[in-house]
Image (cartoon, rainbow, N blue to C red):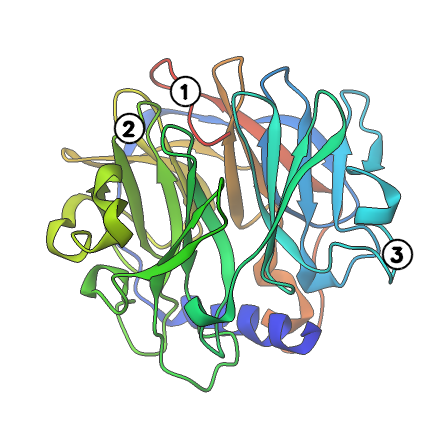
Amino acid sequence: MKKTIVNTILASTLLSTYAQAEIELIPTIKQATIVSTMSERPGNPSVTPDGRLLLSVHPLDHPATKVIELSVAGNQTPYPTTKYAQGENSKFKAVIAIRTDDNGVAWILDLATHSLTGWDTRKEVLVKSIKIPASVLKPTSFLQDFALDQKRQRIIIADMTQNDLKSEAIPAFITVDLNTGEAVRVAENHPSMKADSKTGFALNPITIDPSYEWVYFGAVNGRTVYRVKASEFDNNGQEVADNIEKYADKPYSDGITVDSAQNVYITDIERNAIGVSTPDGYRIIATLSDNQTWPDGMSFGPDGYIYVTVNQLDRTAALNNGKDTGIRPFEVVKIKALANGTTGR
C-alpha cells in the first residue's frame, strides 16, 4: 500500500506540464499568517469547535506518526492516542482527510484501510468505526478527501481512483451514512469529475457550505468548481448526476472550502497561493512565505480564520526525480475569511 500511495502522488508531476490559467491578481494581496512550523510534512488540518488543531501527517513520507494534535506552543502529540496514531502497529495506516463536526467528533478517513473513525475530542473516547465496503470501491480507489454533511449525518467522499497510475480514472462520490454505515457509489465517471486530460488527476477537492445546502467539488487538474445540492444524495444519490452544475472557474487545486456567502476558497498549487472562486471569477487573496510551495488542505476555525497546510509535495523525492528538495520547516498558515460562517472544519 505504501508503494501505491507514493505512485499515486507521483502522477502530480504532470501538473508542471500544464499551461497556467490567466488569473486576476488584486493589488492588496497579503501573505498568509504563519500559525506554526513543523519538521514533518503535514497533510490536512481540522480545527475543532474549541480551537484545537488536528493534523494528518502526509503518508507520502511514510511517517511514524499518522495524526497529531498541534498545540499553540508548537508541541506535536500523537492523536487521539499512541495506539491509534504512532508506530508500525498503529491502527491508523495512511491518513490525509480529517473533519470535525460541531459536537467535537473528529471523523478520520484512513485511505489504506478504507475505514472511518469517529473520535469525540471532548470526552476523548471512540464514537464509531465504519468499514467502507468493497462493493463501493474500485481496485484503484483513492479516498483522500470528503465533505461532512452534519444535517443528514452523511459524509461524501471524493474517490479520485488512479492510485496505481496504470488505470484510467473512474472517479465517483462515495456516500457513507454515519448512523448505519451504509455506503453507495454515486455518479461514477460524470464529466464534472474528470481532469482536463487523461493523464491528469480527477475528482478530489470537495466541501459543503455552512447551511448544508450545496456540495462543491472539482478535479485536481480541472479548471471548474462544480456544485450539486446536498439533498440530491438522498435516495442513494440517484438524482445527483442529473443535477450537477458549473459554479465558477478555478486553477488546479488540491483543496477547497466555502463560507456562508458561497465564496469558494482554493489552494492554488499552480501559483502557490490561496484564492477565491465565485461566479464573477477567480482572484488570489494570499501568498505563501518565500520558498514555500503547494498549499494543500483547508479547515475553518471558530475564530473566522481558514487554516491551511503547506507541504511542498512538489519537492518530495517521488515528485522530483527521486530527490527530496523540501525546505524544512513546513508551515501551517491561516487567512481571514471574507464572510462569517464555518464549514467542514
Name the N-terminal-most of marks 1 and 2: 2
SS of the residue at dot 2?
Answer: loop
Across and down, in percent, residue 232 comes to 21, 44
Give residue 270's quadrant in the image. bottom left
Across and down, in percent, residue 110 comes to 63, 56
Q: Provide the residue designation for mark 1.
A: 337
Direction from residue 207 to residue 326 in the image, left or right: right
Direction from residue 89 to residue 43 in the image, left or right: left
Q: Nearer the viewer, residue 269 or 81?
A: 81
Whether tag 3 and tag 1 are in contact, CB under 8 A, the answer is: no
Q: Nearer the viewer, residue 43 or 114?
A: 114
Q: Residue at x 84, y 39 (%)?
A: 81
Q: Residue at x 53, y 12 (%)?
A: 303
Name the N-terminal-most of marks 2 and 3: 3
Whether tag 2 and tag 3 are in contact, CB under 8 A, the answer is: no
Give residue 203's quadrant in the image. bottom left
